[in-house]
Amino acid sequence: MSRIISLTNQKGGVGKTTTSVNLSVSLAVSEVKTLLVDLDPQSNATTGIEELLVAPNGNIYDALIRGTAVQDVITKTKLDYLDIITSTNDLVGAEVELVGLMAREFQLEKTLKQVSKKYDYVLIDCPPSLGLLTLNALTYCHSVIIPIQCEYYALEGLGQLLNTIRLVQKNLNPKLVIEGVLLTMYDGRLNLSKQVADEVRSFFKDKIFKTVIHRNVRLSEAPSFGKPVLLYDANSTGAQNYMSLVEEILNNGN
Ligand SMILES: Nc1ncnc2c1ncn2[C@@H]1O[C@H](COP(=O)(O)OP(=O)(O)OP(=O)(O)O)[C@@H](O)[C@H]1O
Ligand SMILES: [Mg+2]
């Protein structure tokens, strides 16, 4: 059975894409068959992995809105165990175009259903909003990873996200669970990071991943080379943190 996970937080710049890309790649090098779906019009997951793409195909907008067969929008990568569905800026229009469709919250599920079975994990990189694209991801997935940046206002807006998750559970996807809350950009030298981490831990308790993603310059440099951190600097803290996260997720039995 494949497990479908959305990387969601409507707050911008918290590490959704960094986690989507590096978690996918770390799963793939662990020989876990993985599909990364870039569901953000900013296309950061697509460009962040560009060096790995083999003969780029169509994109998520083609499949979601133009009705292109999903098999025709899957792009292979240089890693045997990783495929990606890329995104383009066209996807901006999808937020509006989906509104007019029947069962508009189920379009992503309808689109990906036939192919997701071929993968052990499908990771969906969501945009920083709670619009229809994110709603489609939440309606389709089994679980959500919520990255939280260890900075001021980390918890701001989380009430709204949790409320949206509850509404989706009630009305669209009763099976939806929180896979885990992930602390990102943690800096052990800063009291602030520690305070935020404590605050998030006391709020989410056992929902927090034991693995913490430290602030690591290699993680922020890698995308400009179109590479995941594991192929940019395998010995970096960032690469190690994401490998630990894979171990934790696989050990959770999901
Ligand atoms: N652990 C980290 N250490 C250092 N820099 C990081 C780390 N995680 C993410 N970054 C950097 O922080 C910025 C935001 O990260 P990212 O793009 O993953 O966030 P996002 O939540 O996907 O943003 P958006 O909401 O715009 O989609 C990027 O420049 C990224 O390279
Ligand atoms: Mg992003």
Image (spheres, rainbow, N blue to C red):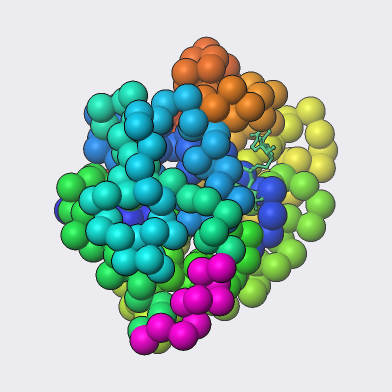
Q: Position of residue 19 (x, y in %)?
A: 52, 41
**Relative horizontal placement of residue 152, taking residue 10 as reference (left or right):** right
Q: Position of residue 149 (x, y in %)?
A: 68, 47
**Relative horizontal placement of residue 195, taking residue 73 as reference (left or right):** right
Task: Return the residue nearer the eye: 248 or 109.
Answer: 109
Q: Please name the residue shown 58% across and 43% down the image.
A: 44
Q: Is residue 197 above or below residue 93?
A: above
Q: Please name the residue shown 47% across and 25% down the image.
A: 51
Residue 148 can be seen in this image: yes
Indicate whether residue 101 is drawn in magenta: yes
Q: Is residue 150 above or below residue 101?
A: above
Task: Return the residue nearer the eye: 104 or 134.
Answer: 104
The magenta stretch is 93-102
Task: Return the residue nearer the eye: 225 or 237.
Answer: 225
Q: Is residue 149 above or below residue 203?
A: above
Indicate whether residue 2 is drawn in magenta: no
Q: Could you tell me how many numbered marks the image carries? A: 0
Q: Please name the residue shown 31% across and 72% down the image.
A: 175
**Relative horizontal placement of residue 103, taking residue 217 as reference (left or right):** left
Q: Please name the residue shown 40% across and 68% down the image.
A: 65
Q: Position of residue 216 (x, y in %)?
A: 67, 26
Task: Return the residue nearer the eye: 234 or 222.
Answer: 222
Q: Is residue 193 above or below residue 1?
A: above
Rendered image quadrant of residue 84? top left
Residue 29 can be seen in this image: no
